[in-house]
Amino acid sequence: MNGLQVNSCGLGECLDRVEEASQWKKRKGKLGAGRGLGMACSHYVSGAAKPVHWTGEPHATAPCGWVFGLGVRPGARLRGTGTRLLEAMCAAFRRRRVTTVRTLLARDNALVLAFFRSQGMMAAPFIALEREL
Amino acid sequence: VKLQKNTLLALYGMLEFAAQPGRQFATAEIAHKYGASLHHLAKVLGRLRRAGLVSAARGAGGGYRFSGNAKRVTLLDVVALFEAVGAKAPRGPRRELERAVDQVLAEIDETARATFGSITLETMLKIARRPKAAPGRGS
């Protein structure tokens, strides 16, 4: 992603170790009525400016470019600079055969949301979720 | 999300005006186009005028023209004149379940507000003019 290659995130090895430590094969289906054995896994991408969970990774279906940041000084706005910056990014993405461009913004960031909207971007089919820990 | 008739009429009107800024529209023209009564539309336009989004022209025929900034006026600016996006939770003692349901409804309202607030009239006109197969969507 972002021009880097992720060859392995170690998920397979991780699952093997969980299987062994939980004695999965020995216990599965043999715990009696009302008891079961389950597992869940998750992963995150480290080293990026933002965690990118849903795309751009090797198992994602379509290559997707992420816009992490774009800024124009207040005094220099309303002259199409942002539009040209984004267009340059999109051109670079297209050269790498990336077919979708995506970004993530705070819901109350009205100005920047309006900018990306004006560039033809619409809501992506994802919902960002979080909880306090 | 479902908007009231008045609100939709206001949005359609604002978009018609913003698409041709400087042009004066007869109330009857908009009313006919969107199947609204003159009386009904006059009330809607009156509210838009008081908000400074349109200006009224005097004289024979009368009419209205756009007086906002299409790059800055958002759908929320128009919608909020006619209805609250997300009614406030009722006061008084609330049961736990009622509060929990309120919380989810508030989440939906927040998203709706953010969506309306991020789309300017100009962007809306762009969306309307865009060819059907929207670029960047689907595969």
Image (cartoon, coloured by chain):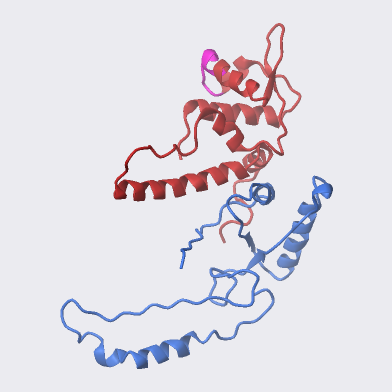
> Is residue B94 found left or right of B70 in the rendered image?
left
- Using the image, determine if residue B101 lies above or below residue A133: above
Colour assignment, chain A = blue
Verify whether residue B39 appears in magenta: yes
Q: Residue at x 29, y 46 (%)?
A: B95
Q: Residue at x 56, y 69 (%)?
A: A55
Q: Which residues are magenta?
A: B34-41
Q: Residue at x 51, y 44 (%)?
A: B112
> Is residue A9 found left or right of B93 in the rendered image?
right
Residue sitting farthest toward the left: A33
- Using the image, determine if residue A9 lies above or below residue A48: below
Quarter-of-image position of residue B71: top right
Q: Nearer the viewer, residue A62 or B3?
A: B3
Verify whether residue A22 appears in magenta: no
Q: Residue at x 75, y 63 (%)?
A: A89
Q: Nearer the viewer, residue A44 or A62?
A: A44
